[in-house]
Image (cartoon, rainbow, N blue to C red):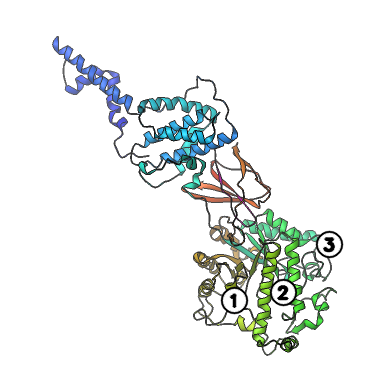
């Protein structure tokens, strides 16, 4: 800590050294004066005594002794023990009072620091019988008192620090640790407001260096259809299925991904226990057959995701009934069997009619059943509403449309189809919130709303081809997040990743989140890994417009570490963990902070304040900023750490963080 004036200790050290060896010789050497007899001897003696006394006064009043006080064993009895709550308060005061001293970068830094410590000593001495607010008032008074002789302060401090060391076992080390890691601007000491010392003492280091990190949705799709990602093939034993899923989740933890979009209804079937729809053939090989030995894959996935601080979003396809590649026949409770009049052959697909109220209600009830019974974090729909058009083949819903017109409807066929999709989106969103308001609702549409709206963009018109009026959904706020599938490279002018992203960001009037969908699978065939790196960087540039993350298709690229992509993600894309962005329109109430935070033997321990905790966020102070070191699951209440200053926060299911508890670990 530098001073703006010359250090008096440096000025006088040589003089004091010489004076200690022989004051008379020292004075004689200055004047080059040889002693004589009689009167001259008397004159010399008076001068020496006067000059020596002056130097002694400089030495006594400088406040800067020749060397640091040595450790001494207290002669007093050990101070009485203080209560845990008062000791915690003292620890906070210890950090913050030392920080306050560091504001003095230009005048009398050492003096102010010692005054602060002097106040802290008084604070500790009185801590056994008085409440913290009274202690704070005493500290205020002590810190503002400037009339005592400074030398007496230093003497008093030396004695009191020994007592505090004896009681606390490391005050000086803590003060030094904080002074080394905290950096402050340089306001003069007179601008430091000590009037509200209670707030200062009860706050943490985060009061001056905010504890924060870059929130980001880091999602990945895991498709079950055609066994793209999980399970690797149909009919595996249950234990093998579980092993494969755990391997995917552990890989996500390794890559600091935080959200799994798991396909649980690929075509009117279920990868979970359902009374409404049959078991999926992609899971067991035969539609309607349960896994052996029996287990519920969705329940298993939810529990294992949450153990790893990963959100699980249940991914549904609302209308697809069968793909050509699916060899298993329909189970009796499949919707194509129960409603054959609305099951249409279209190309190599069987597709349910989105305009039929029975089909709309079936999809709605299936989704709400999952919301009701499982602790999922979100419901997710992809881009399949009406099917992608087959050239020269009309979608065969003329009977349903005719019935609508016969009942008095006057919308065109295209507008009627869009109304059907709009009704489904609005109904599902409202239904989710009526059961569990915290469950998020997201949709991942085709990446082009309408060609030409984003400058220079060409391609399929989903408004006319899939009958998805995504812009309306965003205007109405029916979804909590949108994940447009921007499955093109950055550079092509006809479908440019940044141009399309900017268009979506500009059409988000309700301020919902945008998590871009990225075509990760292209790395296996065409794209360099650097293309994905650049796309993530571009997405981050739009954070101010709520571009708050990415979802990658699909998980098998990470599972197989295609072209070494995992090394790139670990080193440069997601080198540190992150919480998903909060959604304040769903819930912005922070959880209660952890209680009983202690450090002993390099181990942090704590207790949850209640059972609303999803995870714990452990931060560490690095230089003048905080870094999120680790996300711990809710069952964790102890962790071994290296020496340093840490901040611990509770995190709820909506990724709201509590106030932090800051603690120094020796």
Residue topped by disc 1? 472
Work out whether mark 3 precedes mark 1 in sequence or the reverse, and give the earlier one. Answer: 3
Considering the image in quadrants, where does the N terminus appear? top left
Residue at (29, 22) in percent of width and height: 56
Residue 213 picture location, percent across and down: 53, 55
For label 2, the residue is 318
On whether residue 599 falls in the magenta region, the answer is no
The foreground one among 460 and 286 is: 460
Q: Pinpoint residue 52: horizontal percent, then vertical percent.
A: 26, 20
As drawn, is 619 to the left or to the right of 429? left
Q: Residue furthest front?
A: 408
Question: Sequence order check: which comes first, mark 2 or mark 3?
Answer: 3
Dots 2, 1 in contact, CB < 8 A: no
On the question of residue 323 being in view, the answer is no
The quadrant of the picture occupied by the C terminus is top right
Q: Badge 1: few (under 14), some or many (20 or more) residues near its Cα, within 10 Å?
A: few
Kindly report the distance in space between the C-alpha atoms of the residues bearing marks 3 and 1.
45 Å
**Residue 177 in sight here:** yes
Splitting the image into 4 quarters, where does residue 279 fall? bottom right
Query: Could you say which disc has been placed on residue 186 in the image?
Result: none
Residue highlighted by disc 3: 292
Q: Which residues are magenta?
A: 650-666
Please say whether residue 657 is one of the residues in the magenta stretch.
Answer: yes
Q: Residues within 10 Å of mark 3 (few under 14, many from 20)?
A: few
């Amino acid at each position: 800590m530098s001073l703006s004036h010359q250090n008096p200790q440096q000025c006088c050290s040589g003089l004091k050294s010489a004076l200690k060896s022989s004051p008379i010789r020292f004075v004689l050497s200055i004047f080059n004066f040889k002693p004589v007899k009689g009167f001259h001897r008397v004159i010399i003696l008076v001068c020496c005594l006067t000059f020596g006394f002056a130097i002694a006064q400089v030495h006594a009043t400088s406040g800067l002794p020749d060397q640091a006080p040595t450790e001494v064993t207290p002669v007093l009895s050990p101070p009485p023990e203080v209560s845990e709550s008062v000791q915690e308060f003292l620890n906070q005061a210890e950090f913050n009072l030392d920080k306050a001293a560091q504001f003095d970068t230009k005048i009398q830094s050492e003096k102010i620091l010692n005054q602060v410590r002097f106040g802290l000593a008084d604070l500790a001495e009185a801590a056994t019988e008085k409440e913290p607010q009274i202690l704070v008032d005493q500290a205020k008074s002590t810190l503002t008192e400037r009339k005592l002789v400074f030398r007496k302060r230093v003497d008093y401090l030396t004695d009191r620090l020994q007592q505090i060391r004896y009681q606390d076992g490391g005050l000086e080390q803590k003060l030094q640790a904080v002074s080394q890691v905290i950096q402050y601007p340089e306001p003069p000491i007179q601008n430091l407001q000590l009037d509200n010392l209670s707030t200062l003492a009860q706050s943490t280091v985060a009061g001056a260096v905010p504890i924060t990190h870059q929130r980001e949705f880091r999602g990945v799709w895991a498709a079950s259809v055609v066994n793209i990602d999980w399970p690797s093939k149909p009919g595996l034993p249950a234990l093998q299925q579980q092993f494969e899923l755990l391997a995917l989740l552990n890989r996500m933890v390794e890559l600091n991904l935080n959200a799994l979009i798991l396909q649980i209804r690929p075509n009117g079937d279920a990868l979970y226990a359902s009374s409404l729809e049959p078991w999926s053939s992609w899971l067991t090989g035969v539609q309607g057959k349960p896994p052996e030995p029996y287990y519920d894959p969705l329940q298993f996935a939810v529990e294992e995701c949450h153990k790893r601080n990963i959100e699980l979003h249940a991914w549904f396809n609302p209308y697809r009934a069968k793909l050509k590649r699916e060899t298993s026949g329909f189970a009796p409770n499949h919707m194509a069997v129960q409603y054959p009049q609305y099951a249409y052959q279209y190309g190599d697909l069987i597709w349910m009619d989105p305009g039929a109220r029975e089909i709309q209600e079936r999809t709605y009830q299936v989704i709400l059943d999952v919301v009701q019974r499982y602790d999922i974090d979100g419901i997710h729909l992809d881009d399949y509403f009406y099917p992608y058009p087959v050239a020269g083949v009309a979608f065969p819903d003329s009977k349903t449309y005719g019935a609508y017109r016969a009942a008095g409807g006057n919308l065109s066929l295209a507008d009627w189809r869009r109304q059907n999709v709009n009704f489904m989106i609005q109904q599902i969103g409202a239904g989710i919130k009526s059961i569990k308001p915290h469950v998020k609702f997201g949709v991942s549409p085709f990446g082009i709303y309408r060609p030409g709206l984003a400058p220079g963009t060409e391609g399929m018109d989903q408004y006319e081809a899939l009958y998805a009026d995504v812009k309306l959904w965003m205007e109405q706020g029916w979804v909590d997040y949108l994940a447009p599938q921007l499955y093109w490279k950055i550079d092509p002018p006809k479908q440019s990743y940044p141009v399309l992203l900017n268009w979506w960001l500009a059409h988000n009037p309700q301020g919902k989140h945008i998590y871009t969908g990225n075509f990760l699978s292209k790395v296996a065939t065409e794209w360099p890994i650097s293309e994905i790196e650049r796309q993530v960087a571009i997405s981050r540039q739009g954070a101010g417009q709520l571009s708050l993350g990415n979802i990658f298709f699909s998980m098998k690229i990470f599972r197989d570490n295609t072209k070494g992509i995992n090394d790139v993600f670990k080193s440069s894309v997601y080198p540190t963990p992150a919480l998903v962005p909060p959604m304040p329109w769903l819930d912005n109430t922070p959880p209660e902070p952890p209680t009983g935070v202690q450090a002993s033997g390099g181990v942090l321990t704590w207790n949850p304040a209640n059972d609303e905790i999803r995870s714990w966020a452990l931060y560490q102070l690095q230089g003048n900023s905080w870094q999120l070191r680790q996300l711990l699951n809710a069952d964790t209440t102890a962790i071994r750490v290296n020496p340093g200053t840490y901040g611990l926060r509770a995190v709820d299911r909506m990724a709201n963080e509590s106030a932090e508890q800051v603690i120094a670990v020796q």
